[in-house]
Image (tube, coloured by chain):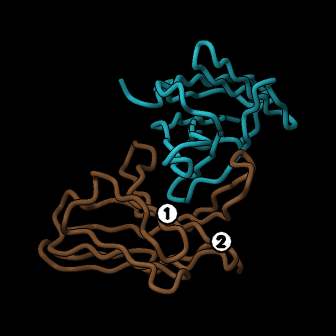
Chain colours: A brown, B cyan
Amino acid sequence: DTGVSQDPRHKITKRGQNVTFRCDPISEHNRLYWYRQTLGQGPEFLTYFQNEAQLEKSRLLSDRFSAERPKGSFSTLEIQRTEQGDSAMYLCASSRLKRVATNEKLFFGSGTQLSVL
Amino acid sequence: RKEVEQDPGPFNVPEGATVAFNCTYSNSASQSFFWYRQDCRKEPKLLMSVYSSGNEDGRFTAQLNRASQYISLLIRDSKLSDSATYLCVVKPNSGGSNYKLTFGKGTLLTVNP
């Protein structure tokens, strides 16, 4: 499978615990994104990497959230001291930067469903 | 005003019906437009890009009105397999955030036998 893969698919944790999610993008894609989706809403942008550089973080990303992409390949998203409001689907996407932006297509992974009890 | 607003739905239609979804966007700097499809508990997948002149892909037709900042998706001869949530998406092509997709809440379509 050469698509975007995310691990784990599901995570159940207790409030206050730390969790970490992993995303492996499509291999030649230099752009990587994290989005969050709650029930009945569209995905909301969290953060963006171009290669290993994190170029934008949404205001949605509190200090408890940190994302890395150390070698410009896979990425991790860590949530510290989880709260019930963090329960959501965390989606990773990747794309390849193109000269003509309209030709750029995002490919999403299957997401990690987080439930904070 | 939300950046992208869609028909709230849900839409329940019989097989073979024609159904249309509407979407408006607030950021006039938006330059790229898309419709994504999302099945229940799955990731969003690109259905089609939306071009200024309008475009068609089989039973699906997308239209864009830049003056009104309005996008539409028409599905003709709907199939059971069209049942999904349809997400309207916009993106700027230039400027510092030319990578960021902004999604609407989505409109749920159920096609009934």
Q: Chain of mark 2?
A: A
Q: Residue at x 42, y 52 (%)?
A: A45
Which quarter of the figure is the C terminus of chain A placed in? bottom left
Q: For this rendering, which residue is in front, A88 or B50?
A: B50
**In the displayed structure image, the side of residue B2 where residue B54 appears, left or right:** right
Image location of residue B45, percent across then percent down: 64, 53
Q: Find the residue positioned furthest to the left.
A: A16
Q: Is residue A115 above or below residue B110?
A: below
The quadrant in which residue A98 appears is bottom right
Q: Are marks 1 and 2 in contact (CB under 8 Å)?
A: no
Q: Residue at x 41, y 64 (%)?
A: A90
Q: Residue at x 46, y 62 (%)?
A: A48
The quadrant in which residue A66 appears is bottom left
Image location of residue B92, percent across then percent down: 57, 39
Q: For this rendering, which residue is in front, B97 or A13?
A: B97
Disc 1: CA contacts within 10 A as few (<14), some (14-19) or many (>=20): many
Mark linked to residue A109 = none
Q: Is residue A117 visible?
A: no
Image location of residue A94, percent across then percent down: 59, 66
List the residue tagged with mark 2: A29
Which quarter of the figure is the N terminus of chain A placed in? bottom right
Image location of residue B7, percent across then percent down: 51, 24
Q: Chain of mark 1?
A: A
List the residue tagged with mark 1: A33
Q: Find the residue positioned furthest to the right.
A: B58
**In the displayed structure image, the side of residue A35 where residue A74 appears, left or right:** right
Q: Residue at x 27, y 51 (%)?
A: A59
Q: Amino acid at mark 2?
A: His
Dot 1 falls on a residue whose secondary structure is strand
Cα separation, mark 1 vs mark 2, equals 11 Å
